């Protein structure tokens, strides 16, 4: 079977199921496991790499009103790969090639390629999507083992959180210019990790916020997981936070409980490493109850900038 993955998270699912040898094409953003970097890239982005966060937001909004997607397919390359299975998603046009473009491309392929659209909105649905891919590739037994291991890790975190006496108010932000609440699986991760997310809705889409909404929630912990951004890229936007009126008065800022995590590698990807994300977040919220598993990066604590003048 020849498989093309049109999303980094589906690439991770495919590889975790032991199907990496079947992968013949991936997106330009697929980078885990590192070995997939050598595979042909069947997509490209329409956003300039040097764009700032505010500019990216404007480009996204404009693009979605006209063309409907921020990615485009390399159709000649896709045709040459002749895939039997294409795995994509229809949940978010910001994150993948538009569903209509995928189906239009499939009609030009010489064979009868099967297309799977994954639309997980919760952690349980992400785990179920592993089973969906496995069924299409006829490796259902592998999926049950993988899902069982991930479920056990999720339940271990939830079990430790159940005995907590205090659950801090958390603001998990998916963007900073403008601010966005977290959505879909992320509020659930906060709950399982032992916090209360008052800006996002479990299973619901993220939404644009006003800074006064963030201030009104008065979070005791702020976790910044910018969608598609690494920790290093996110840090470029942090100085702007200190110019937000009232930011320095937040309980999270006073307590030194502002963190940056890797949204690109972890929180933004609806794949198996969402369980890693849960463990990273749980350790940040309650380090004594939730030890950080070996090999996972700790959330980066953001220090207050030095006083000037």
Image (cartoon, rainbow, N blue to C red):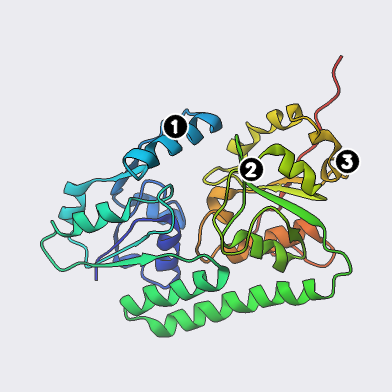
Q: Is residue 150 left or right of residue 72?
A: right
Dots 3 and 1: beta carbons under 8 Å?
no
Q: Quadrant of the N terminus?
A: bottom left
**Residue topped by disc 2:** 209
Q: Disc 2 or 1, which lies upstream in sequence? A: 1
Residue at horizontal 88 percent and vertical 41 percent from the top: 254
Instruction: Identify the disc placed on residue 49.
Output: 1
Residue 18, labelled with which disc? Answer: none
* 298 and 237: which is toward the camera: 237
- For mark 2, does the 10 Å Cα neighbourhood hold few (<14), some (14 to 19), or many (20 or more) residues? some
For marks 3 and 1, the one nearer the N-term is: 1
106 shown above or below 164: above
Q: Secondary structure at mark 3?
A: helix
Category of crowding for the residue at label 1, using alpha-carbon neighbours closer than 10 angstroms: few (below 14), some (14–19), many (at least 20): few
* Number of marks drawn: 3
Q: Position of residue 167 (x, y in %)?
A: 83, 63
Residue found at x 31% / y 41%: 67
């Amino acid at each position: 079977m020849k498989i093309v993955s049109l999303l980094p998270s589906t690439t991770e699912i495919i590889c975790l199921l032991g199907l990496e040898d079947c992968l013949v094409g991936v997106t330009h953003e697929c980078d885990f496991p590192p070995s997939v970097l050598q595979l042909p890239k069947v997509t490209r982005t329409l956003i300039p790499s040097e764009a700032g966060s505010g500019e990216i937001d404007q480009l996204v909004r404009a693009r979605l009103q006209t063309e409907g997607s921020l990615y485009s397919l390399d159709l000649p390359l896709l045709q040459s790969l002749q895939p039997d299975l294409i795995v994509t998603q229809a949940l978010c046009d910001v994150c993948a090639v538009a569903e209509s473009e995928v189906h239009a491309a499939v009609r030009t392929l010489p064979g009868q390629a099967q297309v799977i659209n994954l639309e997980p909105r919760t952690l349980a649905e992400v785990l179920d999507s592993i089973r969906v891919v496995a069924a299409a590739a006829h490796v259902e037994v592998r999926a049950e083992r993988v899902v069982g291991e991930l479920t056990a890790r999720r339940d271990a975190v939830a079990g430790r959180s159940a005995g907590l006496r205090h659950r801090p108010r958390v603001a998990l932000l998916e963007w900073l210019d403008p601010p966005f609440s977290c959505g879909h699986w992320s509020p659930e991760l906060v709950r399982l990790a032992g916090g209360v997310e008052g800006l996002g809705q479990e299973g619901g889409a993220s939404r644009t916020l006003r800074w006064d909404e963030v201030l009104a929630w008065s979070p005791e912990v702020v976790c910044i997981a910018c969608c598609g951004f690494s920790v290093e890229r996110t840090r470029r936007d942090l100085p702007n936070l200190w110019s937000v009126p009232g930011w320095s008065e937040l309980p999270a800022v006073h307590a030194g409980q502002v963190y940056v995590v890797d949204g690109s590698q972890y929180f933004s990807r609806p794949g198996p490493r969402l369980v890693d994300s849960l463990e990273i977040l749980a350790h940040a919220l309650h380090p004594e109850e939730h030890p950080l598993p070996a090999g996972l990066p700790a959330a980066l604590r953001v220090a207050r900038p030095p006083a000037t003048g």
